[in-house]
Amino acid sequence: MIDLNAAGTGLGGYDLLAAQLEALLSGERDFIANAAQFSAFLYNQVDDLNWAGFYLNRDGELLLGPFQGQVACVRIPFGRGVCGAAAASLQTQRVEDVHAFPGHIACDSASNSELVIPLLKDGRLIGVLDLDSPKLARFGVEDQVGLERLAGIFLRATDC
Ligand code: SME
């Protein structure tokens, strides 16, 4: 029996999560199905999250996609907030205190830190993966590396 509660912290945790995600997504390539599964997987297996999900690139604007957590803002222009910064720069945004981030969009007042990973397939921006936490500085460098790895598994397993 694998102790799932051990996952989500440290690189060992992300090795386990990577293997679990590969298994979860195997046999299905549909975008909505896999994005919904990935959101639920992250929300339930990664410690201290209050939101996990997708914003999708729709002609230079981010549109809410599959997610877990509180209801959220539906459309975010590129360049606005943490998600918009990730989409505009194509760089992961790891924010220790969202209240100190210029233009942060407070969808859920419980959020204090955030990690947003741009999702690129064959050079195209598909959207961003957004993770929010009520804990300040929830996401360290090892979380960024681990979660970017999981995002890569999702992209390879899914038709986008
Ligand atoms: N806080 C985000 C908006 C999305 S919600 O967190 C789900 C931002 O500033 O881009």
Image (cartoon, rainbow, N blue to C red):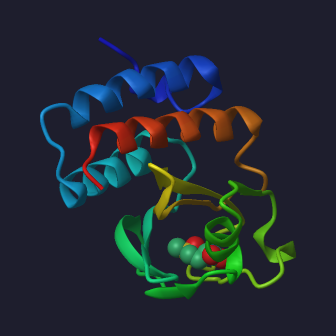
Q: Position of residue 31 (x, y in %)?
A: 24, 56
| Quadrant showing the C terminus | bottom left
- Write the residue at 82% across / 74% down: 101
The tally of labels here is 0
Comparing 160 with 153, the one in front is 160
Left or right, 56 with respect to 147, comes to left
Q: Position of residue 12 (x, y in %)?
A: 57, 16
Farthest residue toward the top? Answer: 1
**Where 128 sits versus 110, above or below?**
above
**Is residue 54 shown above or below 143?**
below
Going 35% across and 38% down the picture, which residue do you hit?
A: 156
Q: Is residue 127 left or right of residue 95?
A: left
Q: Residue furthest front?
A: 123
Q: Residue furthest right?
A: 100
Q: Nearer the viewer, residue 73 or 109?
A: 73
Q: Residue at x 43, y 87 (%)?
A: 74
Relative to 145, residue 84 above or below: below
Q: Is residue 35 left or right of residue 131?
A: left
Quadrant where the N terminus is found in the figure = top left
Residue 159 picture location, percent across and down: 25, 50
Is residue 105 visible in this depiction of the protein? yes
The quarter holding residue 22 reads: top left
Q: Nearer the viewer, residue 8 or 147?
A: 147
Instruction: Please state the quadrant of the image where ligand 1 appears.
Output: bottom right
What residue lies at 65% left-to-right and 60% top-to-bottom? Answer: 90
Query: Position of 128 compared to 11: left or right?
Result: left
Is residue 70 visible to the viewer in this orientation of the structure? no
Where's residue 109, x and y in %?
A: 63, 80
